[in-house]
Amino acid sequence: MIKDFLVKKMLEKQLAGMPKEQQEMIQAAVQKNPELFKKIAEETEAQVKAGKNQMYAAFEVMKKYQKELQEAIAK
């Protein structure tokens, strides 16, 4: 319960510049499949530590999990 609250607050801060509708869609997807987003974050972080640009690393990892991301958002 506390973990969910903290994740929600972190997402609100990270998504502050997005339209409210998109924020809600992403928050719902994260709540439905938090393990997927944890894997994405960990793999992105590992690539950044290996020297890749953060944006490129995130794009590459999200491309890898594109099908799972589409399913999480569509639900």
Image (cartoon, rainbow, N blue to C red):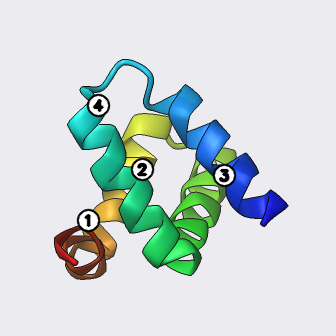
Q: CB under 8 Å between callouts 3 and 4?
A: no
- The CA span between labels 2 and 3 is 19 Å
Does 69 appear above or below 5? below
**Depth-wise, is mark 2 or mark 3 nearer the camera?**
3
Residue 51: name its quadrant: top right
Q: Where residue 66 appears, x then y in whole percent?
A: 23, 72
Closer to the chain start, of discs 4 and 1, is 4
Q: Secondary structure at mark 1?
A: helix
Circle 4 — which element?
helix
Residue picked out by circle 3: 7
Q: Nearer the viewer, residue 23 or 49?
A: 23
The disc placed on residue 15 is none
Q: Dot 2, how many residues are within 10 Å of its Cα: few (below 14), some (14-19), or many (20+)?
A: some
Tell me what residue is drawn at x 57 percent, y 27 percent: 13
Please report the residue visible at 30 percent of the width from the left and 75 percent of the height from the top: 72
Outermost residue, front side: 1
Q: Which mark is residue 58?
A: 2
Which part of the image, by quadrant, shows the C terminus? bottom left
Q: Amino acid at mark 1?
A: Lys
